[in-house]
Image (cartoon, grey):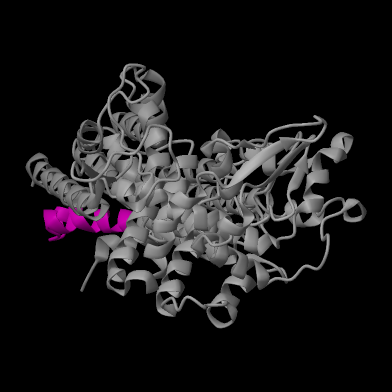
């Protein structure tokens, strides 16, 4: 196929100092930013803070800047100027059709811009592979796919510039290029701008909705597993654990040590839940003395018959730590706890990295590998079911805690801070209670995820409008408003394409979105329906029966917004606009 115009002009672009220098500077900046964020700011951290979402915005801006520079240069020099200096008239007299003149110039632009788009996407993939941080890998892989918005931006800019170039106005072309660039730059900022200006309560509700959404995701996995094995009855591990949850409601009592006669007081359910969620439910056989108060089982013989405690104790036994593994000599296990999400550090920087040691000898990864082969199973639970349940546990441990902040540990609302390691050289005695703890970091992480998995389907949140306006909408009303935002606002739609979770677990995708500076709208539609035939649990109760949990029916309906459909529709619209520009070009060109 002969492409005389394209070949001639392409050779010319290769000699352009402006194009080569600007492309080199922008491309190098892109790589330097990736290096800084991947290997310095993020490094091998097991968590994500605000910096990864800042990276996403910066790379997007650099990408559309490069596309704008190339398109403006090509259309100004080889299109707009050619209509004024007689080049196109000469081409017509040489027998070149208007179609060839138009589309070979478009091809010239696209060879440059698409090459850079592919280069940017490939670099993101390479850095994703090289990143030592697992959650950051997922974020970069998703970004490499979401970066297709840069290509869509290219098509839109091409449609605008090809139309303007037909009239030969270089000044207007430059103005419109700058305007379109500015409109593109604000795309990732729109969700934040909407949040700042929102007075309806929609954006505040979104933050709570993300917390609820994780519960919905975990609950759906556990419920589906329970239904799959429900015919096994008491041999079903998941169903047995769910039915046993109610037995923890009065598991632990406290007694003041410096009061001569003090009656044991049963902890409130939220206090017991905080202990269970912090992975310490198995640690009260001998009691734990903390700040002059002794915490112990109310009836150790009875609680140890609870299937949950029996199973978690069997898991704990897989890692034998010996006597008093956490003591004054080793600073109460500081090297262990500071590589987990069970500590509170005073005065750390906003970009400090946190590394969870999953692969240590007594770490989570080794523990979960040992469970299928070494766990005691006197009850005869189905081992395939336990393996499937452990897949959920693994996902929770690896994905649910990536927004950990040592100044404010996860689930702080449940007083988790009472049961974490305090990293403060001035207050080492705050950690003395750990002398009574004998559980590996892997088993403790397992317990935390286990409680989260069992609690989620039983205590499903059911958002309803209330008087204090903390829930200004029902879920149905929220999703309807989100649907309008996603489809009616082009900036929101483009940002959703950029930030969607194309690759990685759903819990992780939810957490990444939740921690983003430009927090997008939730894109999964959840249907909750009360089953009035089931009993109603008491307000404030946590350790409820499975019947109470299934009083709310859950269905994950699907995506509100399909990014792949949006990509296809937008691409088609922009191609149609380019064809309109072509028809305009044919009419404006004189023979």
Q: Nearer the viewer, residue 199 or 340?
A: 340
| Depth check, front residue: 525 or 127 | 525
Which residue: 41% across, 48% down? 510
Whether the magenta-drawn stretch holds residue 100 is answered as yes
Residue 377 position in % (x across, y down): 52, 77
* Image height of 337 relative to 264, above or below: below
Q: Where's the N terminus, which quadrant?
A: bottom left
Viewer-proximal residue, 446 or 7?
446
The answer, for residue 146, to whether it is visible in the render is: no
Measured as percent of width and height from the top left, residue 588 is found at: 11, 39
- Residue 389's quadrant in the figure? bottom left
Left or right, residue 155 beside residue 382 = left
- The x and y percentages for residue 437 are 75, 54
**On the rendered structure, is 478 left or right of 73?**
left
Residue at x 36% of width, y 29% of height: 205
Q: Residue furthest right?
A: 329
- Percent across and percent down for residue 17 are 51, 50
> On the rendered structure, is 558 left or right of 261?
left
Whether residue 169 appears in magenta in the rendering, the answer is no
Camera-side residue: 180 or 383?
A: 383
Is residue 9 depicted above or below 566 in this figure? below
- Left or right of 83? Residue 275 is right
Evaluate whether residue 511 shows in this view: yes
| Dominant SS in magenta | helix
Q: Looking at this view, name the residue that lies furthest to the bottom.
A: 373
- Look at the image and give the residue range highlighted in magenta: 91-110
């Amino acid at each position: 196929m002969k492409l005389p115009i394209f070949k001639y002009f392409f050779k010319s672009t290769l000699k352009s100092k402006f194009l080569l220098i600007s492309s080199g500077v922008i491309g190098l900046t892109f790589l330097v930013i990736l290096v800084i964020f991947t290997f310095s700011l993020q490094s091998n951290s097991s968590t994500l803070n605000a910096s990864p979402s800042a990276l996403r915005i910066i790379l997007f801006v650099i990408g559309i800047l490069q596309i704008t520079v190339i398109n403006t240069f090509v259309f100004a020099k080889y299109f707009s100027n050619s209509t004024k200096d007689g080049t196109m008239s000469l081409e017509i007299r040489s027998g070149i059709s208007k179609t060839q003149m138009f589309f070979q110039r478009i091809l010239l632009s696209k060879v440059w811009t698409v090459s850079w788009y592919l280069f940017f996407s490939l670099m993101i993939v390479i850095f994703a592979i090289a990143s030592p941080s697992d959650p950051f890998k997922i974020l970069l892989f998703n970004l490499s796919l979401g970066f297709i918005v840069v290509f869509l931006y290219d098509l839109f800019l091409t449609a605008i510039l090809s139309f303007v170039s037909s009239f030969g106005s270089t000044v207007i072309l430059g103005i419109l290029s700058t305007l379109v660039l500015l409109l593109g730059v604000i795309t990732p900022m729109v969700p934040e701008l909407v949040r700042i200006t929102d007075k309806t309560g929609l954006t505040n509700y979104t933050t709570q909705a993300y917390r609820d959404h994780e519960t919905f995701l975990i609950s759906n996995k556990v419920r589906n597993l329970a239904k799959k094995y429900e015919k096994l009855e008491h041999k079903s591990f998941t169903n047995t654990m769910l039915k046993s949850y109610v037995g923890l409601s009065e598991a632990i009592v406290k007694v003041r040590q410096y009061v001569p006669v003090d009656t044991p007081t049963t902890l409130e359910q939220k206090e017991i839940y905080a202990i269970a969620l912090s992975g310490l439910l198995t640690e009260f056989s001998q009691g734990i003395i903390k700040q002059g108060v002794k915490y112990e089982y109310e009836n150790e013989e009875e609680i140890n018959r609870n299937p949950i405690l029996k199973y978690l104790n069997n898991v704990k036994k897989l890692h034998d730590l010996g006597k008093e593994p956490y003591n004054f000599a080793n600073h109460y296990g500081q090297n262990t706890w500071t590589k987990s999400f069970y500590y509170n550090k005073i005065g750390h920087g906003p970009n400090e990295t946190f590394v969870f040691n999953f692969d240590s000898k007594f770490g989570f990864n080794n523990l979960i590998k040992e469970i299928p082969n070494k766990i005691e199973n006197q009850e005869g639970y189905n081992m395939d079911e336990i393996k499937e349940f452990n897949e959920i546990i693994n996902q929770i441990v690896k994905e649910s805690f990536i927004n950990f902040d040592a100044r404010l540990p996860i689930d702080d609302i449940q007083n988790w801070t009472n049961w974490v390691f305090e990293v403060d050289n001035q207050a080492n005695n705050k950690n003395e209670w750990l002398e009574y703890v004998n559980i590996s970091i892997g088993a403790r992480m397992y317990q935390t995820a286990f409680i989260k998995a069992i609690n989620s389907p039983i205590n499903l949140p059911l958002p309803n409008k209330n008087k204090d306006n903390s829930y200004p909408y029902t879920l149905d009303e929220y999703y309807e408003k989100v649907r309008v935002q996603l489809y009616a606002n082009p900036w929101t739609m483009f940002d959703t394409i950029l930030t969607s979770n194309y690759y990685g677990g759903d819990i992780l995708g939810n957490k990444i979105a939740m921690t983003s500076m430009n927090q997008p709208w939730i894109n999964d539609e959840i249907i909750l329906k009360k089953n009035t035939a089931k009993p109603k649990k008491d307000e404030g109760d946590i350790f409820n029966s499975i019947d109470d949990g299934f009083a709310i029916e859950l269905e994950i309906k699907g995506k509100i917004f399909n990014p792949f459909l949006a990509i296809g529709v937008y691409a088609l619209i922009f191609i149609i606009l380019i064809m309109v520009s072509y028809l305009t070009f044919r009419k404006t060109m004189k023979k």
